[in-house]
Image (cartoon, helix red, strand yellow):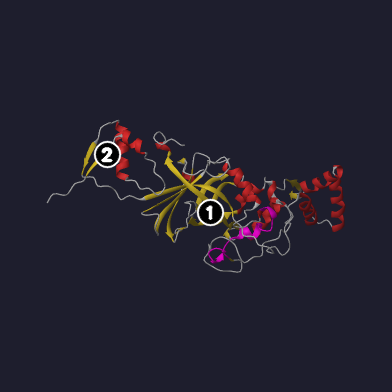
Amino acid sequence: MKRATSIIRVQTPEEVLMQKTIIEPGARQSVAAVSATRLVKSLGLGVSLVMVGVAPAAALETRSYVVSYFAQQFSNEDGDCPGGINPEDERGQTAVILRTLGYSASQVATLMAGWDKGGEGKSKVNDILARRAVIDGQPVNPMTHPEAVPDPGLKFVSSKHAFGFNLDGKDGPDGFIDPHTGEAGVDHQLFRALGCNQNFRGSWTSPSAYGEWVWVQLRDSQPAWLLTLKGEDLSKDGAVTVRIERALEHLRSNLNGTPRRHMTYRADPDPRSINEFRGVIKDGVLTITEHKPFSILWNGLSAPVLNLKNTHLRIRVEPDGSLDGLLGGYQPWRELYFAFSHNGIVGDRPGLWHAMKKAADADPDPQTGQNLSISASYRISAVPAFVVPVDHADTFSAR
């Protein structure tokens, strides 16, 4: 018996371009047909071809998005800092630093009175602050050498709730409960360390001043991040592949600053920013099922690179087609301090170094035992977009 054959008519390049080979998120596309079409175009043929013995490949549905918001996600509540909020204004920080350096209450009052008047009084205090970091008997820059600055003892968050993930599978005394999922043992020590600093304080519905400020700077000063889902039927529960990478273009926005939907972005081929995970969609929530390291080029305003270990992702598909959720894992806290060290909005910068160092909960140094990473969770939102590879830029122009 002869094997049945399939006959597929491949459209001419002109027909393909007229029908738009860039598809809307959620549409399906025959891999075999697209490959054949590109072959026709590359050969410069303008006639129809007949292919015998070729069956269509099983089509996978692909949906792509561009990240429209990304920042640390805290869950502050009234009363979660029993000792009070750490001072954020320059005067309050200065007084705390002087006390940390050993000056008595009366000496601090005298110095601060001079600081308030300006002139020589302020110069005297500023000179003390500039010399508070000492290495081998010599003063050094306290921002670049925070380990040489006495720990000011910033207050930590005392709360039962934090957004995030149970990264270590345990529920110890430092574990939180996620307000949305009810999961216990949530690891989010970055929140514990920084959540009593006013500019970091925020909630799900009210982002922190730092998060809002940094995102506005990031979206216009770095290439966008892209997220692509691939599976048999993304409208149903089932296994998916999740790809997160960088674009060559910046995030495109509307005149009012909101992210513009359905724009086309070229994927950056740099392997340093390509991440792919197996995942699953269940009841409209996407999670990843393998927790490999995550790395993507970021920005000096936050950190040159975002590195995470034991990566977790939980995102809900919203009714309007956008995504909203959390990305988390263990992050090297020294990389975070790089951004804080030259950012005046974060408060007492050497104090943040000491706070993160004390709260760090992963990757112990084999020599000292000091943990080099801290558990962290980031809010990640995205809107539908088109993603094309760079080598097809001649066919698909960014728009």
Identify the secondary structure beneath mark 1: strand
As for residue 195 lying within the magenta part, the answer is: yes
Residue 388 among magenta residues = no
- Mark 2: give few (<14), some (14-19) or many (20+) Cα within 10 Å: some
**Type of the residue with mark 1:** Leu
- Residue 103: percent from left, percent from top: 83, 56
Establish if 223 lies above or below 207.
above
User: In the displayed structure, does residue 337 sit left or right of residue 140?
Assistant: left
Residue 10, which numbered label? Answer: 2
Which disc is residue 367 wearing?
none
Q: Nearer the viewer, residue 117 or 220?
A: 220
The residue wearing badge 1 is 308
Magenta range is 177-199
Where's residue 152, x and y in %?
74, 57
Residue 290, quarter of picture: bottom left
**Which of 174/286 is in front?**
286
Q: Nearer the viewer, residue 62 or 300?
A: 62
Q: Residue 185 vs residue 270: left or right? A: right
Q: Position of residue 295 (x, y in %)?
A: 51, 49
| Earlier residue among tags 2 and 1 | 2
Q: Is residue 239 or residue 277 the one in the foreground?
A: 239
Q: How many marks overall?
A: 2
Q: Secondary structure at mark 2?
A: strand
